[in-house]
Amino acid sequence: MTGATPAWGGRSLRLDPLALPVRWSVPTDQGGPAAHDAAVYLDRSGVIVKRRLSGLPLTLSLPIAAYAGVAIRLTPDAQGALIASVELSHRDPALTLPLTVTRDLEAAAADWRGWSETLSLPMLLIETFGEPSVVTPPASVPIGTPQPRRRTGLLTKRRPRFLVRRKPGHSGEMPVLRGCREIICYE
């Protein structure tokens, strides 16, 4: 990867991480009149890129695991304002795909985290010299040990209020009746 501005740096783009599968087109780095946009299809399992290479149609099908992570790159434009681009980062720069290109840094940060969680890929930050570094998201609110569902204390061993009124049965000897006909069975 290099720190150079990608071909999509001037375009505005925003793909929703919760609206998968998605299709869009990406400009290729090939300059000149023969440059074509690449058609990209992305879902949770993989990416399909259709483009032309030396005039021949090329279709690449890659699993999401082939990508290093979801990266964010900040580049200044001609006026000095920052443009944030959230990218699906690959070792090969030709396979790196833009997901969001915007001047709104808060929206870019939200999309960066959203794409990382949706695709289960690490969050990467592309430094000014071009090398990506892994960013750990801030920890969520720590959760302590849960409280017991029932109170423990002095009164936990006693019977509940509605059972206090009832008298327990007697476990005495049961009477045995002999010489009577049974109601259930007739001979």
Image: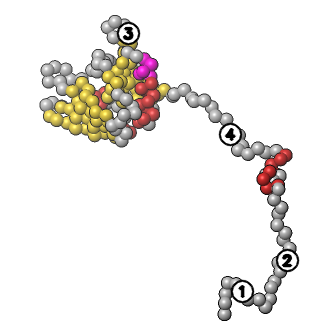
Find residue 81 and name its label.
Answer: 3
Mark 3 vs 4, N-terminal side: 3
Mark 3 or 1, nearer chain start: 3
Residue 182, labelled with which disc? Answer: 1
Q: Which residue is mark 4?
A: 146
Q: Which tag, 4 or 1, sits closer to the chain's start?
A: 4
Q: Give the percent coordinates (x, y) of residue 148.
A: 72, 43
Q: Amino acid at mark 4?
A: Pro
Question: Quadrant of residue 22 in the image?
Answer: top left
What's the residue at 26%, 26% (across, down)?
Answer: 26
Query: Which quadrant does the C terminus fall into?
Result: bottom right
- Out of 98 and 152, give the one closest to the viewer: 152
Q: Main secondary structure of the magenta part?
A: helix
* Label 3 close to label 4 by CB (< 8 Å): no
Distance between the Cα atoms at labels 4 and 1? Answer: 58 Å
What residue lies at 70% left-to-right and 44% top-to-bottom?
Answer: 149
The relative height of residue 186 versus residue 170 in the rendered view (above or below) is below
Q: For mark 3, does the 10 Å Cα neighbourhood hold few (<14), some (14 to 19), or many (20 or more) residues?
A: few
Q: Nearer the viewer, mark 2 or mark 4?
A: 2
Q: Residues within 10 Å of mark 2 (few under 14, many from 20)?
A: few
Query: Spatial distance from mark 2 to mark 4, Cα to Cα?
Result: 48 Å
